[in-house]
Image (cartoon, grey):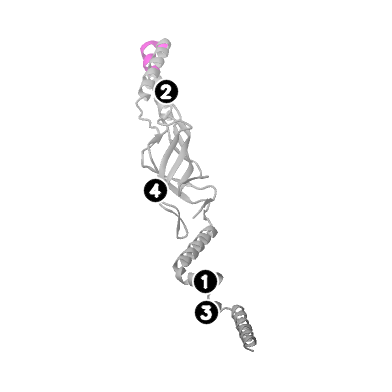
Amino acid sequence: MRSRLALLSLCVYLVFFVIGCNKPPSDNAANAPTDSQTAAGNDQNTPAQNAPAKEAREHKEHAEHKEAKKEPLVVPAGTPITVSLGSAIGSKLSKTGDSFSGSVAKDVLVGNAVAIPQGANVSGSVTDAKALGRFAGGASLQISLNSIEIKGANVPVQASAKSFSEKGKGKRTAVMAGGGAALGGIIGALAGGGKGAAIGAAAGAGAGTGGAAFTGNKDVVLPAESDVTFELSQALEVRQ
């Protein structure tokens, strides 16, 4: 009888032991957050913590997008561009093919916007230079504007060439020479007839020519810092 009771007690103990091993985890274990839940919680906190950085990034992207969409300023044909020369150039000082430099003398506006700022560097070339002839004709100088430096880039420019000239005193020289010959001929005729007239004419012509050397003719000279205004022959696009 006692052995049966002991066996029954052992069986009951074994049953409770097995039930205890198979019992599901406690509520604490079930409620413990998983790694994914923890990461999700961190992600939910990130926008609030990084709001200033996100806003700054979005503002920068918006500014870059707006900058990319900006249309270039178009300086229309016929717009005057005044250039201050960096050095002197002239019909006698320069020769065809020489280059010159300078700067924009005043802002070039398109509406209320500055398309070409004052002080922008420019480059140009001498397209023709003729010094004054001694007896006839005149001095001439022609220059062209080639490019303007805008925001660090040399922008090619199409502008009308600028011409300058000084009239020579060829007529005055010829009159003086002819008058000298005529006067010499008259004196020679009075002195010795036809032969004397010929000699006198030659002498008078020489005297007239000598006088022509002192008529004060001038070459074209554009001093340094002189302002020269060119006019665009084609529209010029300037990126903002």
Task: Characterize the local packing of mark 2: few (<14), some (14-19) or many (20 or more) Cα atoms within 10 angstroms.
Answer: some
Relative to the observer, which residue lies in front, 17 or 47? 17
Q: CA–CA distance between discs 3 and 4?
A: 77 Å
Relative to the observer, which residue lies in front, 56 or 139? 56
Range of magenta residues: 184-193
Image mark for residue 28: 3
Vertically, is 224 above or below 48? above
| N-terminal label among 2 and 3 | 3
Q: CA–CA distance between discs 2 and 4?
A: 54 Å
| N-terminal label among 1 and 3 | 3
Q: CA–CA distance between discs 1 and 4?
A: 62 Å
Image mark for residue 38: 1
| N-terminal label among 1 and 2 | 1
* Element on which disc 3 rests: helix
Q: CA–CA distance between discs 1 and 2?
A: 114 Å
Residue pictured at 45% horizontal, 70% vertical: 49
Q: Nearer the viewer, mark 2 or mark 3?
A: 3
Relative horizontal placement of residue 156, taking residue 218 as reference (left or right): right
Quadrant where the N terminus is found in the figure:
bottom right
Q: Say whether marks 1 and 4 touch (CB < 8 Å).
A: no
Q: Nearer the viewer, mark 1 or mark 3?
A: 3
- Pointer 2: what residue? 178
Q: Position of residue 36 (x, y in %)?
A: 56, 70
Amino acid residing under circle 4: Gly
| N-terminal label among 3 and 4 | 3
Amino acid residing under circle 2: Gly
Where residue 211 sits, quadrant-wise, is top left
Q: CA–CA distance between discs 1 and 3?
A: 16 Å
Amino acid residing under circle 3: Asn
Task: Characterize the local packing of mark 4: few (<14), some (14-19) or many (20 or more) Cα atoms within 10 angstroms.
Answer: some
Q: CA–CA distance between discs 2 and 3?
A: 130 Å
Residue 122 appearing in the image: yes
